Amino acid sequence: MAAPSPAESPELRPAAEAPGARHRGPLAAALRAFRRDRTGMVSLGVVCLFALLALAAPLLAALYGKNATEHYGQDTPGLLSPEGLPVLPNGGMSGEHWFGVEPGLGRDVLAQLLYGMRTSLLIALASVAVIAVIGVVVGITVGYLSGAVDRAFTFVCNVLLAFPTLLLLLALSPVIQTRFVGPRENEPAWMQFTVLIMVFSAFGWVPLAMVLRTAVRSLREREFVEAARAVGASRRHIVFRELLPNVWAPMLVHITLAVPGIVTAEAALSFLGVGINEPIPDWGRMISRGSEVFYDDPTYMVFPGVAILVFVLSFNLLGDAVRDALDPRTLR
Amino acid sequence: MPGSTPRAAALPVIATTAALLLCSCSAGAGTGEARDSTAVQSGKRLSAVLGTAKDSAGPAPAVPGARPGGTVTVANLVDYPHLDPQKIYSGESYSTSLLWGRQLTQYQVVDGRPTLVGDLATDTGTPSDGGRTWTYHLKDGIAWEDGKPITAEHVKYGIERTFAPGFEAGPTYWPEWLTGSKDRSSAVKKYGGPKDGDLDDIEIPDDKTIVFHFPRPEADVPYMAAQSSSSPVREDKDSGTGYDVKPFATGPYRIVEHKQNRSLTLERNPYWKAETDPIRHQYPDRFEFTFGKQTLNTAQEVLNGRGDGPTTVSTKNELPPELFATAERDPAKRKLIVSGSRGAYTNDLYIKNSRVTDPEVRKAIHYLLPRAQARQVLGGPHVGDFATTLSSPAVVGWKKYDLYPVAPTGDITKAKEHLARAKKKVTKLTYAYSADSLQQDRLAQVLGDAFAKAGVKLVVKRLEPSAFYNEVFRGPAPYDLWLNTTSVDWPTPSTLLPDSFHSKLDALNNSIRYANPKVDRELERIESIGDARRKADALIALEEVVMKDVPVVPFLYCGISEFRGADIGGAAIHPIYGAISAVDLYLKKS
């Protein structure tokens, strides 16, 4: 089928209502295209599975009979050698500990992995939610207003893009520790999460806003916007009712691709010791531990490594599929 | 992307399978029981006895199987911060500087047992006047690397240098003892080094005799005379800061070239005579030190015998924890691991007594400390043996005592009993640690786990390494517990209790703020004892009195594991300096 003509666009309903719509709108076409894409469907399945596992982690851990914080290897003789390495081959895999035990502290790897997924997903989804809201509001507004606002926006974006995020976090972490946490207290978990989410969103909204700004700038001159303006619609109406429904496609693609980016960034920060601290399970820290014991217990590195690989890969493939489905050129 | 769909979907599955297959060869650590381990024997008694004049005569007993010749490569990660004998102040530097430097006395090591003997001096010193006067006579035939004889004047000049500005890095005992001052800063007000002329307290009646006059009885002079500070220095060769890079040699080797942070080359000193030296050997032709290569790379080269590996040794690098298990499993590699006691180092859980004032709570902490679990996350038996005493077994007069016996895994029931007896209920304690390795994070988790089992929340504070000492070693520091590794300056108990358990000491020395008037009085009485043996016995007896209050919880007698190439012979950990002793090394073939 042909790409939707500009004339059809004004009738386009907001994204949430679209699936219900029976007419052959671009969304229905996109959905059909997506269903035909097997890679997309498989990666969507994997992503859903990950989400389900993360949501049900406490339940699964209860069924499995292990938790993520207990030092099984230290409390149960025969699991770890005096040097702290798993006694059984393959990282101590057994019927009791399916994925083995962590070298040193002797925690259960499977339970750590399940709870680590919660950490990663919570940070990624919360950051993406903030990014989407800021990016959309700023991007569309700036794209529509242009002029001085646009110049100011471009400047702010350039500043933020030039910001050394990783260095900022490395430098910020001890400051937060000493400035906001009392000497008799540990840094609370919510603070660690909030700091990461704030930093990821503070810098993550920029590319989204820039994409949307460009999209809106080209839409702004289209007939349907001019028509709305001609009938005396308010700016608010034009931005939120006319422009917003037309940019959800690039936004959806952007945030789907942002999730794996944030998951790897969070893992990298924890690997460097400025992300999430002990004892909250975290994939990045597991990989860092895995690299320490790689000579003696390579198996330990496999589980968090493969988990991140599969997770990021399926999210990326899902993002690709979403883009392909929404891109008019691939619609046949 | 219709065409590529099935293959792309299969990718994660293939990746997972491949990764699992690749790693399925990862062997387990085995049972960990009944294996011939490279683990340390740090609990052994290694205290140095005083040798006689006969022991002090050279030559040093030969290392069995040793042969001369060849070049030994010493690959250390970092260069020595100081080579100036009066600035050197660490066990490994002491040990390696024996290659080119000689002192008044020194430790002769035979079969791993140390004896303090005369080095430049004919014996370990003769006290008179109740320990206020010490007399040393120099041997005949001792010479500098240019052949000129070493005289009493040179020894005196060397010790005078310890008073001078710029020498704060070294030990402060000579200035303090010779002037009878409490600390170095008040000592240097009385005499400020060679620029103030002669120090009258060191008398040199002739070229071969040195007489020290101390205002107070000093029992430990023979041990201080073995420190690098007691090396002779020739005024005409003293180039100031340049002497810190290339000192003038008196030992079996002389420094040919020292490129800082890159290399240090030693060759035989022709004027050194074996018959004057009961400590050192002159087996290899040359020593080539290299600095800067990462420890893990050096260790792998050495253990696998690649490149220069077989003729390489490291006197400073420790076996990286990553290779502990590999070295344990492979007998060929296990042979190349050199383990021993890290001198007189001990690792204890320090308790800030001014914060945790109730002895019952401190006893509870003693029972709570999960020694076995903590050592396991630190790397296992390699890091040391469980301690029950404050002082190390390497200390003269050491006696084993175990005031509150406890299983290595801790005793939660006993701890709860003591906590119940506490005057005020304790629910929260803080543990501070330096964030210098990830092991420390895990150790904090282990401690937190154990304390939680007794109903005490352990708040673990991770401090930046640079901030740790400033934060913890100050009077009002808000932390209750921290692990501390420490050693006496020489193997007698004289620098242990008097330097850290007197209530008048500052927070830097008495960091736990221990204050017991009875102990203070006893320490002041012991200070005036001039006889080394009686002083050591009195201090060891006092140690048990102190430890009854559990001011600190003994954790480990520290061990050390280093590595040597397959062709390197004579490698053993120096029992006092806690590093591979360079003066006994030889090449099996070259």
Image (cartoon, rainbow, N blue to C red):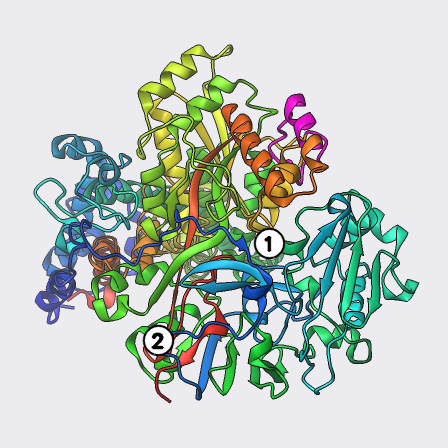
Mark drawn on residue B302:
2
- x%, y% of residue B82? 65, 68
Label 1 CA crowd tier, 10 Å (few <14, some 14–19, many 20+): some
Specify the quadrant of the image occupied by residue B589: bottom left
- x%, y% of residue B394? 48, 49
| Towards the viewer: A48 or A195 | A195
Mark 2: which amino acid? Answer: Val
Dot 2 and dot 1 within a common chain = no
User: How would you classify the magenta stretch by its main secondary structure?
Assistant: loop
Q: How many marks?
A: 2
- Please give left or right for residue A272 compared with residue B528 in the image: left
Q: Residue furthest right?
A: B196
Q: Is residue B522 magenta?
A: yes
Residue at the spot x=47%, y=43% of the render?
Answer: B347
Mark 1: which amino acid? Answer: Val
Whether A220 is drawn above or below B365: the answer is: below
Q: CA distance from mark 2 to mark 1?
A: 65 Å
Q: Nearer the viewer, mark 2 or mark 1?
A: 2
Q: Which residue is mark 1?
A: A149
Whether B416 is drawn above or below A241: the answer is: above
| Towards the viewer: A313 or B531 | B531
- x%, y% of residue A214? 45, 61
Q: Chain of mark 2?
A: B
Q: Chain of mark 1?
A: A
Q: Is residue A140 magenta?
A: no
| Towards the viewer: A137 or B29 | B29
- x%, y% of residue B421? 44, 11
Residue at the spot x=35%, y=82% of the render?
Answer: B588
- Please give left or right for residue A20 compared with residue B184 in the image: left
Label 2 CA crowd tier, 10 Å (few <14, some 14–19, many 20+): many
Q: Tell me the magenta residue range.
A: B503-524
